[in-house]
Image (tube, rainbow, N blue to C red):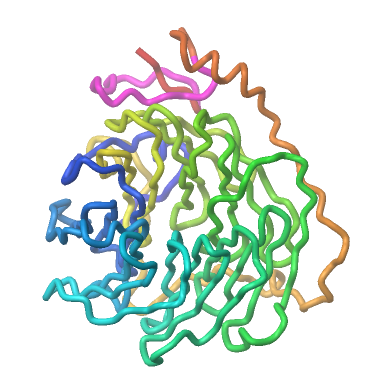
Amino acid sequence: MSIRLNDDAMRQFRVAKVFQETDEHKLSLDFSPDGRRLLSCDHSALSVFSSTRQTELCQVHMHHYLPEVACFAQQDTRALHSTSKYDYAIRCLDLETRHCVRVFSGHSKSVHRLASQPGNENVFVSVGRDDHVYVWDFRSSTHVHHMKKLQGPLCAFDPAGLVLATSTDTERIEIHDVRMLGEQPCLKFVYQVNDKAKWTQLQFAPNGKTMLLSTDHSWCFSVSAFDGTFQQSFTGYSNQLRQPLDATYTPDSQFILSGADEGRIHIWRADDGYPVAVLKGNNVGPVRCLRFNPQATMFVSSDLLLAFWMPMANGVYDWVERLPPGETVSFKDEEDVEKEEEPSKSPIAMQQPLVDMSLIRSRLYRKRSRSQVPIVDLTKPPDKKDTLEEGEITED
């Protein structure tokens, strides 16, 4: 049995365990494909945790490399990490022997994005501050593809690993067929955005229907993965220092979570942008890293602390039967399959975030008797009786 995620279930997440294995801010988090292991990266160390037991399995010191990002490669026995101290190469670390087994050189500045291709344990992509994107294969001595003419690029594989999306600045997204990376992109979406927010994260929804773009402002938004049209904006959280705060989908693509200032995590419905809740846990600074487990009902957040979040043990939930081994859910219906069309040359109009930031900042610095968006205070046990209206959470 597993929990069916709905508004009530999302409001009942609580911090189950907290770690502070180093004194550094966490820079990236990554779950293994089976969700059993979590990889945490900061400048001083790579740490691997068991998601099921919520214990630290190993830690590898990284003072000689100062990595900024890391991800699992070839299941969960090896990890890729960037370097920024002596060179900008990508190194592959065997987590069992603690030895470097491969070095991938090519970037002239530090790498800030790494992503493995779903369904292919040998291929991964890297994005550097030199505005170059490289596609690598463990079976090749050099990169297999190189994208140059980009500005502030981001990239993401779709859940099936069939296409690679790249972005340029805050104006264009290109969709590439991974089998024909040397050819022109299959689709190209051009956007007209008046807001000065910089795109900081690009990701596909687990069902492959939408893409989510995070910004260094106080909003993120989703677009269609088929035609690039604007879908929904998610606003109302604070990001005063304009940091690249992570956002993440739930595995069923129903909800979006985003980190915010003062350790807050905002949750919205993905389809209509309705604010479901604001969770407040042990993190005290901005929640920069946030990941939902791809196979389990749990997620992790981090600043200096690494917090594991799980639903309350005594909560009331809807339960569903787990799928038999080998059986999967088909997310794409026949009516959703669209024929490829010529890319539109006219910019796609984007909605502006409907949020008054001055008002939000003032509210964050004074005691509120009642919040328009529910906030969960985890420092005190929840009341046994729930007499609140739907979508409302008390604030002590």
Q: Position of residue 160 (x, y in %)?
A: 51, 76
Q: Nearer the viewer, residue 17 or 306?
A: 306
Residue drawn at the location 47% of the way across and 57% of the way down = 252
Residue drawn at the location 39% of the way across and 38% of the way down = 287
Q: Is residue 389 magenta?
A: yes
Q: Nearer the viewer, residue 384 or 79?
A: 79
Q: Quadrant of the C terminus?
A: top left
In this rendering, the answer to whether 388 lies above or below 29 is above
Q: Position of residue 383 (x, y in %)?
A: 28, 19
Residue 91, visible in the rendered structure: yes
- Asked whether, in this view, residue 5 is left or right of residue 282, the answer is right
Q: Nearer the viewer, residue 9 or 173?
A: 173
Q: Is residue 308 magenta?
A: no
Could you say which quadrant of the image residue 132 lies in?
bottom right
- Asked whether, in this view, residue 297 is left or right of residue 183, the answer is left
- Asked whether, in this view, residue 244 is left or right of residue 34, the answer is right
Could you say which quadrant of the image residue 219 lies in?
top right
Q: Position of residue 353 (x, y in %)?
A: 69, 35
* Total residue callouts: 0
Residue drawn at the location 27% of the way across and 55% of the way down = 40
Q: Nearer the viewer, residue 149 or 94?
A: 149
Residue drawn at the location 62% of the way across and 63% of the way down = 209
Magenta region, main secondary structure: loop
Residue numbers of the magenta segment: 371-390
Residue 118, visible in the rendered structure: no
